[in-house]
Image: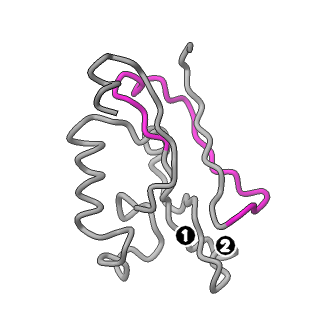
Amino acid sequence: METLREHHVPFIFCGDFNMAHREIDLTNWRRLQDYPGFTPPERAWLDTLFDGRGYVDAFRAVNAEPEHYTWWSNRGRAWEKNVGWRIDYQVASPALRGAVRGAAIYKRRRFSDHAPLTIDYDWEI
């Protein structure tokens, strides 16, 4: 990522990071503060990625609302109750900060314990 950034090549890095960044990104954050996926070192790493290095959490660039998750446990009817975590990301290079236009998490059908995250960009490739 840093090499692309140094060469001023805009990019989007997508995937399941298995980490929630902020309290807004999971349902039971108080109880889970030291649970894998939401530990202080994991959150600090994401702070460095987004705040320190200027990369863009594309979803949060356009949606600051709570209760938008991309993963739910298969136990306890978590999907039905929307007790989840937002752990799937599209990380955009700083040059694309202004290009994020919209974001959605597809939940009409369930394919796995994750839901697809789609982001709309105004970016000519």
Q: Position of residue 60 (x, y in %)?
A: 44, 45
Judging from the image, what secondary structure is the residue with disc 1 in?
strand
Viewer-closest of 6 and 74: 6
Q: Residues within 10 Å of mark 1 (few under 14, many from 20)?
A: many
- Report the magenta residues as a range: 90-112
Disc 2 versus disc 1: distance between alpha carbons? 7 Å
Disc 2 and disc 1 in contact, CB within 8 angstroms? yes
Q: Residue at x 65, y 67 (%)?
A: 113
Vertical order, 64 against 119 (above or below): below
Judging from the image, what secondary structure is the residue with disc 2 in?
helix
Q: Position of residue 5 (x, y in %)?
A: 31, 25
Instruction: Tell me which amino acid carries mark 2.
Output: Trp
Color style of the picture: one colour
Identify residue for label 1.
84
Identify residue for label 2.
79
Instruction: Locate the C terminus by quadrant.
Output: top right
